[in-house]
Amino acid sequence: MAALAEVDSEKFSARLIAADDAVFHRLLELEGNEKIAGERIALEDTMADIHLLRESSFHFRSYK
């Protein structure tokens, strides 16, 4: 949520990286635990969204 509210482009990128790392580490924690498949799916969706935001922010900065 902090990344989405960030208006400074440098801080935005840093927050996206931090969010990506946090989601990735949580996915590693859930490895092999099939009881929480819903959380895994939500985290994978979140990771995909973060990657889209990172690509979009990169393209946006390159046109400035």
Image (tube, rainbow, N blue to C red):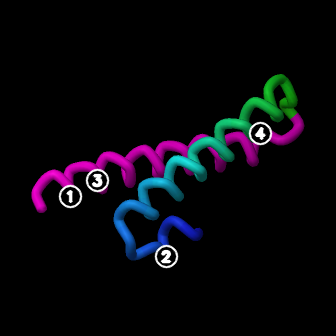
N-terminal label among 1 and 2: 2
Lateral position of residue 48 relative to residue 37, left or right: left
Q: CA distance from mark 2 to mark 4?
A: 29 Å
At mark 4, the secondary structure is helix
Labels 4, 1: front one:
1
Residue 18 magenta-drawn?
A: no
At mark 3, the secondary structure is helix
**Mark drawn on residue 56:** 3
Lateral position of residue 18 relative to residue 40, left or right: left
Which residue type does callout 4 highlight?
A: Ala
Which residue type does callout 1 highlight?
A: Phe
Q: Tell me residue 40's x, y (percent).
A: 71, 40
Furthest-front residue in this view: 10
Q: Tell me the crowding category of disc 2: few under 14, some 14 to 19, or many 20 or more residues within 10 angstroms, Cα based.
A: few
Lateral position of residue 32 relative to residue 26, left or right: right
Q: Tell me the crowding category of disc 3: few under 14, some 14 to 19, or many 20 or more residues within 10 angstroms, Cα based.
A: few
Q: Which residue is mark 2?
A: 5
**Mark drawn on residue 37:** 4
Q: CA distance from mark 2 to mark 3?
A: 16 Å
Labels 3, 4: front one:
3
Q: CA distance from mark 4 to mark 1?
A: 35 Å
Q: Tell me residue 34's x, y (percent).
A: 84, 31
Q: Which residue is mark 1?
A: 60
The quarter holding residue 41 reads top right
By secondary structure, the bulk of the magenta-drawn segment is best described as helix
Furthest-left residue in this view: 63
